[in-house]
DNA sequence: AGGTTATTGAACCGGAAGGTTATACAAGGG
DNA sequence: CCCTTGTATAACCTTCCGGTTCAATAACCT
C-alpha cells in the first residue's frame, strides 16, 4: 500500500471544509456551486478543495452540460480505516499490558510506517 | 467533538515519518534519539514531528533523567476511526443504493463537517 | 567542577496550503 | 449570436510545514 495514498487521504481529511464537503456528498451527487453554497468562501477556493479531494481519490467527477457533478468515492476512506484499525487494540481496555507484550516482538518495518502486525484484536 | 481535534489528528497522520513514529511507539515507549535513529533526518526535525503528534494528543511524554520518553496515546485514533466509521456503508457493497436512499434525508450539520447520521451500518 | 549525552529552541529557508480577485473557457438558453 | 451560468486557471499574498544549522538547557558521570 503506497504511503502516498495515505498521505493524500489524511491530508484531504485534515481540513474541516473538505470533511464537510464529503459529508454533503454522502447524501448524493452535487455540483460545485451546490457544494460551495454553505461556505463563506469564494468558489475558486472550493474548486481547490475539490482538487485535493480528487487527488486523494475521494471524489470523482461527471459531466452534466456545463456542470461538473461530484460523487463520493469512499475507497480511500476504507484504506485509511484499515490503517487505523491496526491500532484498535491500543484504545480498547487492557492496552497497557498489550503495550508491554508487544515490546518484545522487535519491529521490522517501522521505517515504512506500517502499523504493528500483531496489534489486531 | 471539536473539529480541531480531527484537524490535528488527521494532519499528524498525513506525514509518513509521523506514522512511522506511531508504528514504532506501538511496540512500547521510546526516547527521542531512539525514534530518530531510523530516519535520515536531523534530530530537531524529529522533535518537531513529535510536537505535532503531541498537539494531536497522539503521544504523551515522561521523564527519565535527561531522556524524554514518548508513549503512544491512541485515544485520538479512536476519534478519527469513529468519524471514518460513519462512511463504512459507502465502501461496502450496495453503497450506490444507500447513496440514493440517504439523498432524501436532508442534511443538517453539513457545515460542521459531520458525517451522515444515517450512514452507520 | 567540567564534560558528555539527550533534548529543546531560535533563526532561517524553500516550497506548499489556503485564501483572494480577476480572467478565461465551455456549454445551454434566449 | 450573444448573454448568462458553471467551473477552472492564473497570479498573487500570507501563513504554515518540513527541513536545516547552531546555540541553549538539563541532567547524568567522573
Image (cartoon, coloured by chain):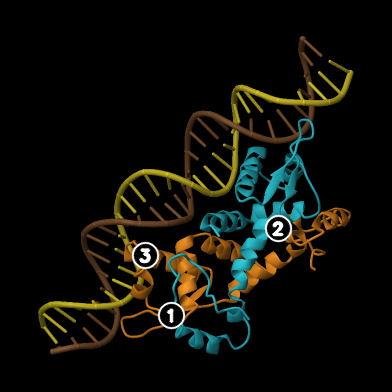
Chain colours: A cyan, B orange, C yellow, D brown
Residue under label 3: B39
Query: Mark 1 highlights which residue?
Result: A106
Asked whether A60 or A48 is in front, the reply is A60
Q: What is the distance, in whole Å, between disc 3 and disc 1 at their CAs?
A: 17 Å
Asked where in the image residue B97 lies, by quadrant, the reply is bottom right
Residue B7, quarter of the rendered image: bottom right
Name the secondary structure under disc 1. Answer: loop
Task: Report x, y in % for residue B74.
Answer: 57, 76
Residue A42: quadrant of the picture: top right
Residue in the picture at 84% in, 58% down = B98
Are dots 3 and 2 in contact, CB under 8 Å? no
Tell me the chain of label 1: A
Q: Which chain carries label 3?
A: B
Residue A105 as seen in the image, left or right of residue D28: right
Q: Which of A57 and D14 is in front in this view?
A: A57
Q: Residues within 10 Å of mark 1 (few under 14, many from 20)?
A: few
Q: Is residue B117 left or right of residue A84?
A: right
The residue at which mark 2 appears reads as B113
The answer as to whether the residues below labels 3 and 1 share one chain is no
The foreground one among A91 and A33 is A91
Please give the name of the residue rendered at 57% of the width and 79% of the height, measured from the top-left corner.
A119
Dot 2: what SS?
A: loop
Q: How far apart are marks 1 and 2 (CA)?
A: 40 Å
Q: Position of residue C10 (x, y in %)?
A: 31, 60
Vertical position of residue A89 compared to residue B79: above or below: below
Whole-percent x and y of residue A45?
A: 62, 42
Subunit bearing disc 2: B
* Crowdedness near tag 3: few (<14), some (14–19) or many (≥20) residues, C-alpha within 10 Å: few
Circle 3/circle 1 CB separation < 8 Å: no
**Image point 53% across, 68% down: which residue?**
B56
Amino acid at each position: 500500500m503506497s504511503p502516498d495514498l495515505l498521505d493524500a487521504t489524511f491530508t484531504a481529511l485534515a481540513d474541516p471544509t473538505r470533511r464537510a464537503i464529503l459529508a454533503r456528498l454522502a447524501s448524493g451527487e452535487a455540483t460545485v456551486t451546490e457544494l460551495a453554497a454553505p461556505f463563506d468562501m469564494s468558489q475558486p477556493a472550493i474548486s481547490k478543495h475539490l482538487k485535493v479531494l480528487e487527488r486523494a481519490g475521494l471524489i470523482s467527477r461527471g459531466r452534466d452540460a456545463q456542470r461538473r457533478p461530484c460523487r463520493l468515492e469512499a475507497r480511500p476512506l476504507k484504506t485509511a480505516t484499515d490503517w487505523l484499525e491496526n491500532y484498535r487494540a491500543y484504545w480498547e481496555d487492557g492496552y497497557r499490558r498489550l503495550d508491554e507484550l508487544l515490546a518484545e516482538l522487535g519491529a521490522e518495518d517501522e521505517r515504512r510506517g506500517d502499523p504493528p502486525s500483531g496489534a489486531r484484536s
